[in-house]
Amino acid sequence: MAKRLGSQLFVSRLSNYTTNQKLEKLFSPFGVVKEARLVLDPRTQKPKGFGFVTFDSESQAQKALKAMDGRCWSRRSVSLCSTVSLGRWQWTRHSCTKLFVGGLSYDTNETVLKDAFRQHGEIIEVKIICDHVSGKSQGYGFVQFTSESAASMALKEMNGQFLDGRHVRVCFAHKG
């Protein structure tokens, strides 16, 4: 069975000058963009350098992923991955050990993130994405486990939980 990606893409390494409209225009050649949404800093209301693009179909998202991942746009190499919910992951039965963790406090570091997730299984890598200039957290990161079952359990148990005073969003992260 072919790997299923879903119709939503996580887009990172975006310029701070990116708008929702520019993001939608960037991805519209690949299909119908149902939503293009940048994640904003709650204090400044400025883009945090990442967002989500939802297409009308999975095949459109796949085309965009293949064409745009690693491409230079606005003097930056854009990074893409698919987001898939737990229910869809179980239905399609493909392998994934890496989780996207969003909504992190800017004070959350990799040690805190690892400590929060380690009870669910052996962790290979924890990475908090930071601004390349200031070095400050962008409010999201990734946790990779040694097994699918550990990642699945962590997603189930940690999605919506409080970590450093913030509700975190957890979903599978798939590289296309």
Image: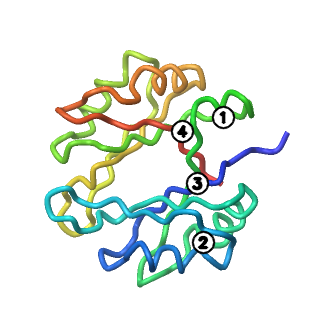
Residue at the disc numbered 1: 88
Q: How far apart are marks 4 and 2 (CA)?
A: 20 Å
Check disc 4: other Cα within 10 Å, few if <14, some if 14-19, many if 20+: many
Q: Nearer the viewer, residue 65 or 53?
A: 53
- Please tell me whether mark 1 or mark 2 is closer to you in this view: 1
Check disc 3: other Cα within 10 Å, few if <14, some if 14-19, many if 20+: many
Residue at the disc numbered 2: 68
Check disc 2: other Cα within 10 Å, few if <14, some if 14-19, many if 20+: some
Question: Measured from the top left, where is residue 41 in percent x and y?
Answer: 23, 59
Quadrant location, the C terminus: bottom right
- Please tell me whether mark 3 or mark 2 is closer to you in this view: 3
Residue placed furthest toward the bottom: 75
Q: Residue at 49% across / 38% down in the picture?
A: 171
Residue at the disc numbered 4: 172
Tell me the quarter of the picture where residue 166 sits.
Answer: top left
Precedes in sequence: disc 4 or disc 2: 2
Residue 13 appears left or right of 63: left
Residue at the disc numbered 3: 8
Check disc 1: other Cα within 10 Å, few if <14, some if 14-19, many if 20+: few
- Please tell me whether mark 3 or mark 4 is closer to you in this view: 3
